[in-house]
Image: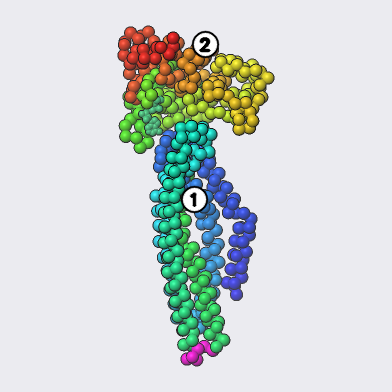
Amino acid sequence: MAGYVLKQILQFISNITINAGVYERCTDYHKQAIAQKSSRLPLILYEDSETMNIKTRAMDCVNREVLSQIYMSSAVFATSAISIISLVSVLASYNLLFILLSLLTVMPYFIARRLRGKDFYALKQRQTKRVRYRDYLWELFNDKTAVKEMRTMGFDQYLREEFKETRVEIDKELWEFSKKDALSLLFCDTIRVIGYTASVVLALVLTISGEINIGLFGASIGAFLAVQNETKKFLMDLGSLPEKISFAKDYYAFLDLPEERKGSVQKESLTESIRLEQLEFTYPNAGAKTITGVNLEILKGEKIAIIGENGSGKTTLSKLILGLYPVQQGRITYDGEALEGLNQETFFQMVSIISQDFMRYSLTLRENVSISDLERADADRDILGVLAMVDLDMDPAQLDRMLGREFDGLELSGGQWQKLSIARGLFRNSELIVMDEPTSALDPLIENQILMNFLTVAQGKTAVIVSHRTGLCRYVDRIVVMKAGEIVEVGSHSELIQREGEYTRLYTTQEQWYV
Ligand code: ADP
């Protein structure tokens, strides 16, 4: 009786929790945790395929509500256990053989769930990379630029086939698993039915021999069936618990990944220089070093151009200078303070990054510029000033006009969008500006014009401009030439021309662009 009451109470509690949307809320909470972790993950981990696999599995765990199921299963286990104990005690009063028979014939459910659960988790692990590939291809069909390119170049059919093949392969493996799973369950069901039949025979024997009367014959079979069903449910849940825990471990493995460094030194401005000493850097899972033995001092107020062919390591070096990638070997110091010890928030307040992968925000023209320094969103003169500096002459009346076609705004050309992204970087009134091929989509002469405009107004600011073009080199203080991850030459335009080395080679091949 007490067991019955307790079971009802537990059942009531679990119903209330389910009805109150605990599942959904748990899922939302865990999604939020993944989003938060993603925003704190060091950028370098985004270059690591295994980290992305862990993230995919963590999201899979959340989307399949595995964590909520584990939390809820404790209540379910308790309710089932109470039911089983009370039913078994009823069955014991008829004959102990009933208990043995009922429990043994549902045991295979536990073994099957345990083994299939292991298989399922292993399958999901094996499939992660392919699932990411399938999702990546799917994203391509949703990307405007990619769709345009695949259509005009005629490889949409190829990508569709690739998507189909990957999808079919993944689904086929899941289907094979389901078939095996269904067969295991069929086997378990057969043993259970054999057990049930044996219990009917046993009840008949007991009735004929006069141990139980005809009334108890029906009751014992009913109780037997109830024990089997309740124990089956309990064992299936118990058997699949290790699988669920494995999925949950993936979620926690993602949350346990290291976060962005949290330095405490408040550095709001550069007073002397940035110094790189014996810097070395290797990308995760890459065999060779991308940066080797780099030594460089960038003085406050200096304008430096980092020049070199594609793949020579310029972008990597600029990301290291900004602390976007961690220092693995060697040192980077700002006025003698180690970069990793600086407080990130204040550090990023003093820098502005203008990159070749520019964003096209479907926001107003004003927002597209001032989003980098929202406190000055109303400074129309400054906004128009940077727009003029990048040679994007816009009508002041157009400042609040929406841009981009997504929301019926004014569409700009690729070059205009890039100019706008440079304007955004320049509007942020920071003292260190790092530009990574900011003008790659523009004509070399326009590029020169923009950079010259910038250099004239950027007095006092420290600027590092990464480019594979040499056009701007005449106007900067110092040129750093990179080749295969090393700095091979440093000097002014005239000094380097006299050396007749790598810089001269690059300069002479590009000279005709600037005529
Ligand atoms: P640059 O800016 O001079 O064109 P990068 O710094 O972009 O050169 O790249 C330098 C080298 O590092 C290249 O050989 C490139 O293949 C390699 N590299 C860049 N990104 C990664 C990455 N995420 N993983 C492995 N290697 C990379």
Going by the numbered disc 1, the residue's amino acid type is Cys
Of the pair 394 and 50, the residue shown nearer to us: 394
Is the residue at mark 2 in contact range of ligand 1, meaning its CB lies under 8 Å from it? no
Color theme of the render: rainbow
In the rendered view, tell whether residue 107 sits above or below residue 507. Answer: below
Instruction: Sort mark 2 into few (<14), some (14-19) or many (20+) by Cα contacts within 10 Å.
Output: few
**For the residue with label 1, is its CB less than 8 Å from the closest atom of ligand 1?**
no
Asked whether, in this view, residue 291 is left or right of residue 64, the answer is: left
Q: Of all residues shown, which one is farthest toward the right?
A: 397
Determine whether the residue tagged by mark 2 lies in a helix, strand or loop.
helix
Q: Is residue 411 above or below residue 34?
A: above
Residue 220 position, x and y percent, is: 53, 81
**Dividing the image into four equal quarters, which quarter contains ligand 1?**
top left
| Quarter of image, res 119 | bottom left
Q: CA distance from mark 2 to mark 1?
A: 54 Å
**Is residue 212 one of those drawn in magenta?**
yes
Query: Quarter of the image holding residue 283?
Result: top left
Against 186, residue 331 (above or below) is above
- Is 24 placed left or right of 440 in the picture? right
Q: Is residue 277 visible?
A: no
Residue at (54, 45) in percent of width and height? 31
- Going 44% across and 9% down the picture, which residue do you hit? 515
Q: Which residues are magenta?
A: 207-213
Provide the residue designation for mark 2.
456
Which residue was labeled with disc 1? 61
Residue 165 seen in the current view: yes
Describe the element under mark 1 as helix, strand or loop: helix
Drawn side of residue 246 relative to residue 25, left or right: left
- Of 292 and 360, nearer the camera is 360
